[in-house]
Image: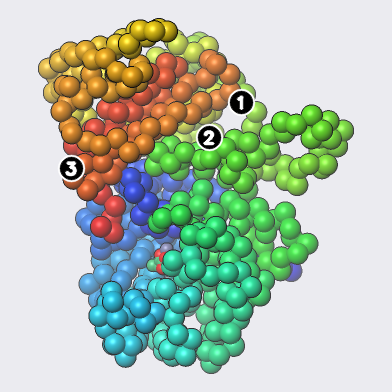
Amino acid sequence: MKDRVIIFDTTMRDGEQSPGASMTREEKIRIARQLERMRVDVIEAGFPAASNGDFEAVRAVANAIKDSTVAGLCRANDRDIGRGIEALKGAKSWRIHTFIATSALHMEMKLRMTPDQVLEDARNAVRFARKHCPDVEFSPEDASRSEPDFLCRVLEAVIAEGATTINIPDTVGYAVPQQFGEFIRTLRERVPNSDKVVWSVHCHNDLGMAVANSLAAVVIGGARQIECTINGLGERAGNTALEEIVMALKTRGDFFPAETRIDTTQIVSASRLVSQITGFVVQPNKAVVGANAFAHASGIHQDGVIKSRQTYEIMRAEDVGWTTNKIVLGKLSGRNAFKQRMKEIGIDLESEEAYNQAFQRFKDLADKKAEIFDEDLQALMSEGRVSSLYERWRLVHMSQASGMGERPHASVVLSEAGKEHSAEAQGDGPVDATFKAIESVAKSGAELLLYSVNAITTGTESQGEVTVRLQKAGRIVNGLGADTDIVVASAKAYLAALNKLHDKTERINPQV
Ligand code: KIV
Ligand code: ZN
C-alpha cells in the first residue's frame, strides 16, 4: 500500500488574495461543493477574522460541506482563532490553521517582534486552538528563509502544544527543489517530536518552481500534505497548481511514493468554475487544464496519435474531465432536462426561483444559439451571479457600427434603478466605443486594467466570454460577460465590473 498525500486546497483563501479574485459567499459554496465532489481532503475556505463577509462565507462553507475537512486561516492570536472557531464549529470536520512569521526579516521588519515573542505567540496560539479543536495546523510563515535552529525550536514547541499538522511555507517562492526537499527532511530529522504530526508544504510560484518544490518535499522530505490551488491561483505568481500535483502523482505513480484520493475526472470542471468566478482566464498552454493541453497541431504528432495515442499523450483527456463539446440541450429542451443537466455538471441551485431565472436565461441563449454545451451552461451561471448582486446598471439595448476606414460608433441604453439613460460615443474599435458610451453615462472614473476575450466552445458560433478588470480607489474587481456577440459580451462584462464596484457586499481582497 502506498502512502497517501493529503490534498489541502487553498483556492478560496490564498487564491482569493489575487487582485480582483475576491469571492462572495455563494461563489465560495459553489467552489467548495465542486472541491468536495473532487474528493479534496481539506478545503481552506477563507480567513474568518479578515472581515464579516469572509467570516460568513467560511461559516456557510463549513455548514454545507460533509465529506471534506473545512479549514480557516487565523493569525496567532486569541481573537483571530476565536473567530475561526465560531465560523467553523458547525462543520462535520474542521481545522484551525494558525500562522506566524519566523524569518528574521519578517520578525524584525514586519512583526517588530523578537524571536522569543514569536515563539511565545506560536505556542499560545496552538494551545488555545487545541482547547477547542482536535485538528490544528501551524505554519511558520517564510519558513524557507528562516534560520533552521530557531525554526526547529518553534516547531518542537507547537507540536508539544498539540499541533497535528506542520506546514512549511515557501512564502515568497524562493526555494529550489532539491534544497527544499532536503530542508523538509532536515526539519523532520531534527525536531524531536516530528513523528507526531503530518508534514505539509505550501509553495508559491515566483520562480515557476512551486509544483517541483512540492513534489521534492514529498519524495526527499517525506511531506504528506500539499497545499495547492485550482489553476495555481494565488498571491503574485500564484501557488502550487492542484491539477498538476495530482496528475503528476498519478501519471508518474511508478516514481512517486505516495498517491491522492482525488477524483481526477472533476478537474476540468473545477478549473472552469474557478476561472469563471474569478475572471482569471486559464492560459491555453497551461498543463492539464489549458485548452491546448491535449491538442495536437503538427502533422507528425497528429499522425502518431492516430496510430497510437501513447506516442504523444501521457494522460488521457477524459481522465481529467475533458469532454469533446457534446450538444446537451437546445431550443426545445424543457425545464426538467435543463435542471437535470445542471445537476449532472455539478451546478446545484439553492431554490426553484433560482432555477426559473437560470432557465429563462437559458431560453434567451437558445434563441441565439442552436446547440448549448456544458460550457455554455457554466457561463450562464457566471452571468446569473451578476444578476444576484446589487445591480445598479443594467444593459437595456446596444448597437454599434464599424467598417473599414470608418470610425466605430456605439450607442447604449442603460437602466439605473428603473430609469433609462442613453448615450453614444466613437472609439478606436467597437468595444472601445461601447465602453466610452457606457462611461459617459456611468461616470465611474474607473481604470481599465484588463480586457480579454475567450471563445467558450469551439467554432465561430461559440459564445465569447469577456473579462473586464477595473480599478478604483484601491479596489480591483473583475466582471464577466458572455454572449454570441462579443461586443455585447464586452458591455455585459464592463457593467458587471461596475456593479461590483458599487456593491457594498462585494469584498475587497480580504487581507487588505
Ligand atoms: O504563503 C504563506 O506563507 C501562507 C501562509 C499563511 C500559509 O499563505
Ligand atoms: Zn501562501
Give the secondary structure at mark 2: loop
Mark 3–mark 2 Cα distance, whole angstroms, equals 31 Å
Q: Residues within 10 Å of mark 2 (few under 14, many from 20)?
A: some
- Give the residue type that dot 3 points to: Lys
Residue 423 visible in the current orientation: yes
Give the secondary structure at mark 3: loop
Residue 347 in picture, x, y percent from top left = 46, 36
Q: Quadrant of the N terminus?
A: bottom right
Q: Quadrant of the C terminus?
A: bottom left
Image-based side of 140 in relation to 393, left or right: right
Q: Could you tell which of marks 1 and 2 lies nearer the N-terminus? A: 1
Q: Which residue is mark 3?
A: 504
Q: Nearer the viewer, mark 3 or mark 2?
A: 3
Give the secondary structure at mark 1: loop
Q: Which residue is mark 2?
A: 345
Q: Residues within 10 Å of mark 3 (few under 14, many from 20)?
A: few
Q: Which residue is mark 1?
A: 325
Query: What residue is at 35 percent from the left and 7 percent from the top?
Result: 406
Q: Could you tell which of marks 3 and 2 lies nearer the N-terminus? A: 2
Q: Residue furthest right?
A: 307
